[in-house]
């Protein structure tokens, strides 16, 4: 290749957007490179030998170019003549004097004015960026070494401390300028940009300098891949902006805002403590532990914090998810000493920048080491929790060596967050105290929420109202009755607060007392109505809230042997019945007058029910809502109860589903829901007989009982049961003189019932040694677990219960010669 071709080839690469002409000393075109038609109108080869002055609209331009003093090259702007009569073309001319080059005197580059403008703008931009320090600009080569940069920021330009040796960032790697924890991820990002060509835009990251590792430094980085015209990697261009203060301010604001918005939402102490720990880790620290005093956890009023007072570790959080075993674990009880107690009483956050000295001082103190010295921790802070002048506890915070140690600014930030957290925890404590008082009262007045008896499985749910005094007067009860029967009770006392709860307790106690006599539902309500009148007469005139007069009550008795339910109401809405075979409806029950307000009789209703049928009793605000057929809540209750009866869903889950619409907008009054899924006693577990009033049938009744117990594999109860049957049947024949009914029920106990038409109740007494009789019921009481009697529509029934595993017969000092033949 000739020297002329070599020069033109190199020049053509530079003038990719224009043309290059080679001129002799006289200004005649001797060679050309590039596309010339756009500028010259015709191929440059046809211009060979043409004087360059013929192409210029201003002939003086050539003279100005060739006579420029003190320069080997210069450039001007002018226009070129067009050969086809079109408008002249604006160009920039760059002239290079070859001065003795082979076969040529000048090298001339023609660039369109627009292209020249872009090049000049690019040059101006680069000069501006590399001559200022407001925006960092760094060029990394393909090996990620720094090759060019604008003026260094002050902290980097300052270099290492005096005596640390020479410092020159030119040619250095990021690992030589930044701490390793910050250098590694940043260099990996730059290599990814170099390998893939995908730019990195406004990536905010930590960039602490190696000679100032304790000084927090955050930069915003943008990186672009640089490559030559042929695609060869030249390196990576990086711009960075120091946003340390902006990020620090934003981070502080976000942390405080998060604490303000999240703490205090819950009125649970544990939730607030755990939320505080999770709020601080990993944003503020690598480890956090929240320790609270026992008085806070118990809901009592905090007293003066004394040295050695116990703290409970209620919440922990670790950045890596693993709480170190070297520290006190979650749930541990901690007793701190004099120095720590004094710090907590002062209320200001205390921090240690470096734990190395503390590790040596606490080497022999196991308790303080477990309290302070976390493995791998480099700095430590204690944040007291104070609210309303009392010490509630403390927060322990640790940072590892990979993070900057705690500073005074960090302590102020922690105190700001701690004050908000302490107020939220104290509010939760005060609520806990009030809530526990109400819960204690409710537990004492209501039965177990879930019960399973032979006759039914039940689930009762009490929902406090939305008012400040949540304790109200609605209630429920499930009472087991003799012979596997069960009574379902719901009621409501007017008013709220402790007075209403006390009235509710009196009514519930009265119902249980009356139920022990086992009257029919309408009779029980009649006795209860009379009791309410007497209680109202004894009540103070100004004690309006919680009055028992006007209270409502519904009482239902279900017999799983007969499959019948008898119920009556004193001013209370009827329950919803969902049969297992489909359909649902409100029981057709006419409520009588409220307790203590009427005097009219209470009309009972009897239902034929089957195993699996569902009864839903309501009280309080829920009952008021379900009184109206048009209320959508009643339709929802029917639909949910029907599906629950059909699919056998757990009653607690079913209850939550029924109450969901009510809880979405809680009423001011409390509500009660009692669900009962009925059961039946299997036919093979019941045996019954009827005998004439003839003394000779006593032995026959014993024989029948003996055969039945053998079929039930209860041979060990034959003797005691024969004794019971012999005595009760004999008494029935002797005193009633009418047919006698005998029934055995095998349940979780063996139940024996003897019925006769007499209304005379038996009485237990201890016979004297000289008495010829009177020992029968005493014997029955000795061999049974329980016994009693109840009136029926046709007379009375005496019942007994025996434990299936049997019981030791002990007749004391009675000299008995029992003949059961």
Image (cartoon, rainbow, N blue to C red):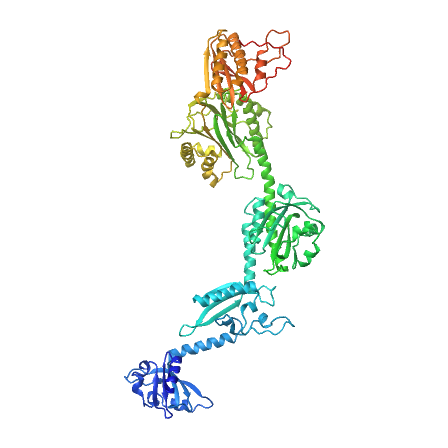
**Residue 79 screen position, x and y as percent:** 35, 84
Q: Is residue 562 visible?
A: no
Residue beneath the point at 66% across and 44% down: 302
Tell me if residue 604 can be seen: yes
Residue closer to the observer: 760 or 768: 768
Q: Is residue 303 left or right of residue 536?
A: right
Q: Is residue 693 above or below residue 560?
A: above
Q: Nearer the viewer, residue 117 or 644?
A: 644
Tell me: residue 546, above or below residue 751: below
* Image coords of residue 632 (percent x, y): 41, 36
Counting from the top left corner in percent of width and height, residue 395 is at: 62, 51
Q: Quadrant of residue 160?
A: bottom right
Instruction: Please identify the residue farthest to the right as the structure is shown.
Output: 338
Q: What residue is shown at x 46% (from left), y 21% (from top)?
A: 685
Q: Residue furthest bottom?
A: 26
Image point 61% across, 13% down: which residue?
765
- Asked if residue 88 lies left or right of residue 218, the reply is left
Side (left or right) of 31 relative to 798: left
Residue 601 is situated, as x and y percent measured from the top left of the image, at 48, 20
């Amino acid at each position: 290749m000739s020297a002329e071709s070599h020069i033109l080839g190199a020049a053509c690469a530079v003038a990719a957007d224009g043309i290059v002409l080679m001129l002799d000393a006289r200004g005649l075109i001797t060679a050309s490179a590039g596309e010339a038609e756009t500028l010259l109108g015709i191929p440059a080869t046809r211009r060979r030998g043409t004087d360059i002055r013929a192409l210029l609209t201003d002939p003086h331009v050539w003279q100005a170019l060739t006579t420029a003093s003190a320069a080997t090259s210069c450039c001007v702007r002018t226009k070129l003549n067009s050969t086809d009569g079109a408008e002249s073309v604006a160009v920039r001319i760059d002239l290079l004097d070859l001065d003795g080059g082979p076969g040529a005197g000048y090298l001339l580059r023609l660039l369109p004015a627009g292209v020249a403008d872009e090049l000049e703008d690019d040059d101006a931009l680069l000069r501006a960026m590399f001559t200022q320090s407001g925006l960092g600009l760094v060029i990394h080569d393909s090996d990620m070494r720094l090759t060019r940069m604008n003026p260094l920021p002050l902290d980097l330009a300052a270099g290492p401390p005096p005596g640390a040796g020479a410092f020159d960032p030119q040619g250095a790697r990021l690992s030589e300028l930044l701490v390793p924890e910050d250098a590694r991820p940043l260099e990996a990002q730059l290599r990814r940009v170099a390998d893939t060509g995908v730019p990195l835009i406004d990536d905010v990251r930590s960039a602490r300098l190696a000679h100032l590792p304790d000084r927090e430094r955050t930069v915003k980085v943008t990186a672009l891949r640089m490559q030559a015209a042929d695609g060869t990697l030249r390196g990576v261009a990086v711009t960075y902006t120091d946003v340390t203060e902006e990020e620090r301010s934003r981070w502080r604001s976000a942390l405080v805002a998060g604490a303000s918005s999240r703490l205090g939402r819950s009125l649970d102490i544990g939730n607030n403590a755990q939320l505080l720990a999770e709020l601080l880790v990993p944003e503020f620290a690598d480890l956090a532990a929240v320790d609270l005093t026992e008085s806070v956890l118990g809901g009592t009023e905090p007293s003066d914090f004394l040295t050695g007072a116990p703290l409970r570790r209620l919440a922990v959080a670790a950045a890596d998810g693993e709480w170190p075993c070297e520290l006190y674990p979650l749930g541990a009880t901690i007793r701190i000493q004099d120095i720590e107690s004094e710090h907590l009483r002062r209320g200001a956050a205390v921090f240690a920048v470096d734990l190395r000295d503390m590790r040596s001082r606490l080497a022999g103190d196991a308790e303080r080491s477990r309290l302070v010295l976390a493995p791998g921790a480099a700095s430590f802070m204690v944040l007291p929790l104070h609210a309303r002048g009392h010490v509630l506890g403390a927060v322990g915070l640790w940072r590892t060596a990979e993070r900057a140690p705690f500073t005074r600014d960090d302590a102020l930030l922690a105190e700001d967050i701690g004050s908000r957290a302490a107020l939220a925890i104290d509010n939760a404590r005060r609520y806990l105290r009030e809530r526990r008082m109400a819960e204690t009262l409710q537990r004492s007045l209501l039965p177990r929420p879930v019960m399973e008896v032979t006759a039914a499985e039940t689930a009762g749910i009490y929902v406090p109202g939305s008012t400040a005094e949540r304790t109200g007067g609605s209630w429920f009860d499930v009472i087991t009755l003799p012979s596997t029967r069960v009574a379902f009770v719901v009621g409501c006392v007017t008013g709220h607060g402790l007075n209403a709860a006390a009235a509710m307790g009196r009514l519930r106690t009265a119902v249980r007392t009356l139920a022990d006599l086992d009257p029919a539902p309408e009779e029980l309500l009649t006795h209860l109505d009379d009791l309410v009148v007497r209680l109202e007469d004894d009540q103070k005139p100004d004690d309006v809230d919680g009055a028992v007069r006007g209270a409502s009550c519904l009482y239902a008795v279900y017999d799983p042997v007969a499959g019948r339910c008898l119920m009556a109401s004193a001013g209370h809405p009827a329950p919803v019945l969902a049969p297992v075979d489909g359909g649902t409806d409100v029981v057709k029950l006419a409520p009588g007058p409220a307790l203590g307000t009427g005097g009219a009789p209470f009309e009972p209703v009897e239902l034929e029910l089957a195993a699996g049928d569902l009864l839903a009793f309501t009280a309080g605000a829920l009952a008021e809502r379900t009184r109206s057929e048009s209320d959508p809540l009643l339709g929802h209750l029917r639909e949910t109860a029907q599906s629950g009866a059909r699919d056998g869903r757990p009653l607690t889950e079913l209850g939550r589903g029924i109450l969901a619409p009510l809880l979405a907008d809680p009423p001011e009054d409390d509500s009660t829901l009692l669900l009962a899924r009925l059961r039946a006693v299997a036919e093979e577990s019941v045996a019954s007989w009827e005998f004439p009033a003839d003394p000779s049938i006593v032995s026959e009744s014993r024989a029948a009982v003996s055969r039945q117990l053998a079929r039930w594999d209860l041979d060990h109860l034959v003797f005691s049961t024969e004794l019971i049957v012999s005595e009760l049947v004999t008494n029935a024949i002797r005193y009633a003189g009418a047919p006698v009914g005998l029934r055995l029920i095998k349940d979780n106990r063996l139940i024996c019932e003897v019925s006769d038409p007499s209304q005379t109740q038996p009485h237990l007494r201890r016979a004297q040694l000289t008495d010829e009789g009177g020992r029968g019921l005493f014997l029955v009481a000795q061999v049974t677990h329980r016994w009693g009697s109840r009136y029926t529509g046709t007379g009375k029934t005496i019942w007994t219960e025996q434990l299936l595993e049997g019981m030791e017969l002990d007749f004391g000092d009675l000299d008995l010669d029992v003949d059961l033949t």
